[in-house]
Image: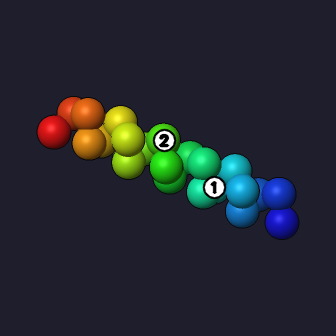
Amino acid sequence: MANTLWYRYCIRLFIKRFRNLS
């Protein structure tokens, strides 16, 4: 269950980083 939270956090960070690159 805790893994889900970590996964969501990673995805959010990835999206933010990707948007910054664009």
- Residue receiving disc 2: 13
Mark 2 secondary-structure assignment: helix
- From mark 1 to mark 2, how far is it between C-alphas? 10 Å
Residue 2, image x and y in percent? 83, 57
Q: What amino acid is labelled 2 in the image? A: Leu
Identify the residue at horizontal 56%, vertical 46% (top origin). 10
Cβ atoms under marks 1 and 2 closer than 8 Å: no
Residue 5, image x and y in percent? 72, 56
Q: What amino acid is labelled 1 in the image? A: Tyr
- Residue receiving disc 1: 7
Residue 11, image x and y in percent? 50, 52
Q: Tell me the crowding category of disc 2: few under 14, some 14 to 19, or many 20 or more residues within 10 angstroms, Cα based.
A: few
Identify the residue at horizontal 38%, vertical 48% (top origin). 15
Mark 1 secondary-structure assignment: helix
Is 5 positioned to the left or the right of 17 in the image?
right
| Residue farthest toward the right in the current orientation of the protein | 1
Is 20 positioned to the left or the right of 3 in the image?
left
Give the position of the C terminus as an image quadrant.
top left
| Residue farthest toward the left in the current orientation of the protein | 22
In the picture, the disc for residue 21 is none
Number of on-image labels: 2
